[in-house]
Every structure is written in C-alpha cells, then in structure tokens.
Amino acid sequence: MIDALRHKGKMKLGGGILMVGIAVLGAGAVFVFSPSGSIEIGGVTTDATKIQAWTAAVTPALQKPLLGNENAIQDVPPPGKIGHIPPELRALYATSWSVSSPARLAYLSSLIEQRRLNAMIVDVKDYSGVLLYPIALPQLMGTQKIPFRISRPNSFIRSMHQQGVYLIGRISVFQDELLAKLHPEWAIHDAEGNIWRDHKGIPWLDPAAREVWRYAVAVARDALDRGFDEVNFDYIRFPSDGNIDEARYPFWSAARQPKSEVIREFSNYVRNQLAGEIISADIFGISVVKNDDLGIGQKFESFLPFFDYVMPMTYPSHYSHGFLGYDQPAEHPYEVVRYSLARAVQRRQAVAATVTEPLAKIRIWVQSFDIHSRYDRKKIQAQINAIEELRTTFQDAVAGWALWDPANRYQDFNNGT
C-alpha cells in the first residue's frame, strides 16, 4: 500500500481505482496522471514504465509540511558533498520555487540528463530574502515565522547527488528585501528616512554593514555543511539603478572608502570565513571590458584572489548600442561573449604574472532569455561555442558556463529551435 502524504483527484494504482490529478507519494515520486494512464512530469508526457527513472529525479517531500507543522516530516542526515568539481561546468539556474515544485524539479533534472549538463545553481537565498529551507540564525530571531520553500533540504541534496549533479547554492547578498524589513538599521534609506528602493522597488542593504556580511556567511556555512558543493554569491555590489543620489548609507561613507574597497573587503572576509570551501562570485559582464568600478564597486581584478570562480554575466542584450561597432549587440552573441571572455582571460593573465597565489578561474553566465532579441537555440549555442573555443586554449583560466533563464523554462535550449 502506498503511503500518500498528499493527493488530489484520482490516480490509477495497479488494479485499483482510476485517479486523476496530483499525488505526492511516500517514496518521493510526484506525478500527474491522466485518464489514459500516461504520466506528465514537468510538461513532458511519458508512460508508466518510466516511473523508476523519474522517481530518482524527484526529491522526497519537498513541499512544506501539512498544517504548518515543521516537525511533521523528518529529514535525512546531511549527505555531504559530491566529492568532485567539474573541470568544465555545464550548469543551469533554478529558483527555489522551481525546486520546491516536484514537477518542475523533475523537468529540470531531465533537462540536465538530456543535454548532458553536470550542475545546478539553486537559490538558497534570493533577492526577496526568502530562504530555500529554514535556518536558525540570530539575525532572524525574535521575528515572525520566516517563509521558506522546502522542508527537507538534505533529501534534496542527496537526490541531486545521486543523479551525479554538482550542486551550487546561490545567495543574493546585498539585495535582500526580507532582511531590510527585519533590520532597517542595516538598509539604505532615502533623504526622508524611508527605506530606499531601486527601480524595481527592491530595497538594498548597505554593503559596508558587517552584520550583513555575517548573515550571508552564516547562510553559506549552513548550505555547505549540509552538502552543497559550492556557494555562489550574487549582488556583491552597490545599487546600479534607481535614484542613486537619494541613497543614504548608515555605514558606508564615500569620503572614507571607495565602493570598490568595500566590495574587496567583503570578498576577503568571505574567503577567510569559508576557508577550504569552493566559492564563486557573480559580476557584471561589462566589468571585464571596463577598467573602473562601474559605480557599483565591482572591479574584475579585485575578485580574483578571493574566489575559486568568477562568473561574469556577459549577456549580449546588456551591452549598449555601439559596443564592438554593433547597433544591436544582442544580435551578435558569439562576438560579444568571445570578446568579453578573451578580455577577462587577458586581465587574469596580467594579474597572474605578478602574484604566486592561485587566482579564480572564469565561468560565464549564458543568456537564455529574451531581451532586445529572440534568444533561440542558435543564439544560446553561439555563446557556448565562444566559451568552449577559448577554453580549448585557456584551460587554466576558463572553467565552463551556466545557463540563466530567470523563469527556468529553457525551452529553446531544450527543444533546439
């Protein structure tokens, strides 16, 4: 007899009754059954003979416990790390929403297998500040119940490792709506004393606030101790948009310290606190072709001594009119990415010639979404081709790529259209 934690509608089990709908089974498998007996997982229909293959791709009891009882479902012990680092990362990004949906997770897992990817980058803490799973941290104490997406993180980690997937936890550092709400004394304010927001309406934390540094490291430490193989830090910068002139910082002062020095000190702090762990940093793609800090504190060379990997977001759609002489840089993904990566390699080599310590290798975020241009399979593959060509020559510097689609559809990459 199958122990169903939750079911909706009807499902056909052996010679039993016909059931149609969604079932979350005690074995951890989540399927959408049709009246014909076929099974739909993540929008892909298969037959019942493939259940076992899909079961391994679905994490047990990902969703929050019933009735809000966090003790209703016990997790397995922390499974530990997978034990190897892919020399060439081939990853996709997944939101915490996606991995909390068994159907979406099954789709992404199948995509990893079908397209021969080897890693997944998952939000452990996104820009909203919501955590992937509950973590007891002093910065969150004395507040209302903190929202989270899944209640069995160790089971999720174990499931991905069983598929051979290298798991990276992504942490949004200085863009964190929840922490700004809980600790407004750490947040950027406007001239009237209200919490300052960027053009999307999202608040920011002061990058010079040491308590914010401690919080980011504490979240990272928990993820790594549970078995995440690597932590990826994003939004390691000052705001780039919104009414910047109105921003008032409770800790940072331009008269005392340049923005780039604040970010460098944070990077050094993270490295020291997470010594021996694999860590990576996301930076603006344009930072590899510009020599200043872009007004946000990001200088490419400043990240190299502290992280194992630096991941420029070289999205062609984000380069301005006239870049490399193109009216529409988004229409030239191969050229934009190849030029940007070549400049990054060149600048890394210049630093390497002056130091003996190891430097971060470079991974590239690949645009897999539509802005200013339709990003079909051809444009996505053009970026990958540029990266892999340069890696052939610079294996000591170039270490792969990761697909970025904020909606996690990856339709064009999957379908080959």
Image (cartoon, helix red, strand yellow):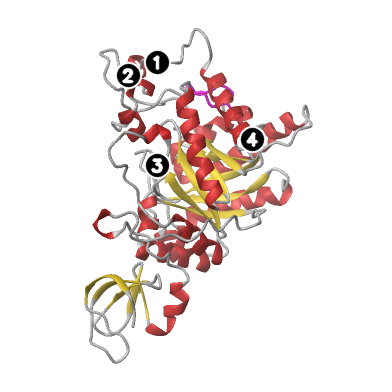
Q: Are marks 4 and 1 in contact (CB under 8 Å)?
A: no
Q: Residue 81: image x %, image y %?
A: 60, 55
Image-quadrant location for residue 361: top right
How many neighbours does mark 1 have within 10 angstroms: few (below 14), some (14-19), or many (20 or more)? some
Judge depth for marks 1 and 2 and give the one in front: 1
Q: Residue at x 55, y 66 (%)?
A: 162
Dot 2 or dot 4: first in sequence order is 2
Pick whichever, 92 or 379, lies toward us. 92
Q: Which residues are magenta?
A: 291-299
Residue 289 vertical position relative to residue 27 in the rendered view, above or below = above
Among all residues in the image, which is located at the extreme top? Answer: 255
Residue that numbered label 4 is attached to: 343
Q: Which residue in the protein does label 1 denote?
A: 250
Q: Could you tell me if the residues under marks 1 and 2 are in contact, i.e. CB atoms within 8 Å?
A: yes
What residue is pinned by disc 3? 126
Residue displayed at 54% across by 44% down: 231
Q: Which residue is mark 2?
A: 189
- Viewport quadrant of the N terminus: bottom left
* SS state under label 4: helix
Dot 3 or dot 1, earlier in sequence: 3
Please tell me how crowded label 4 is: few (under 14), some (14-19), or many (20+) other residues with Cα within 10 Å. some
Q: Circle 3 — which element?
A: loop
| Outermost left residue | 9
Tell me which label, 2 or 3, sits earlier in the chain: 3
Give neighbour class at mark 2: few <14, some 14-19, many 20+ (Cα, 10 Å): many
- Horizontal and vertical percent position of residue 381: 53, 56
Between the residue at mark 2 and the residue at mark 3, the CA separation in whole angstroms equals 21 Å
Disc 3 and disc 1: Cα gap in Å? 23 Å
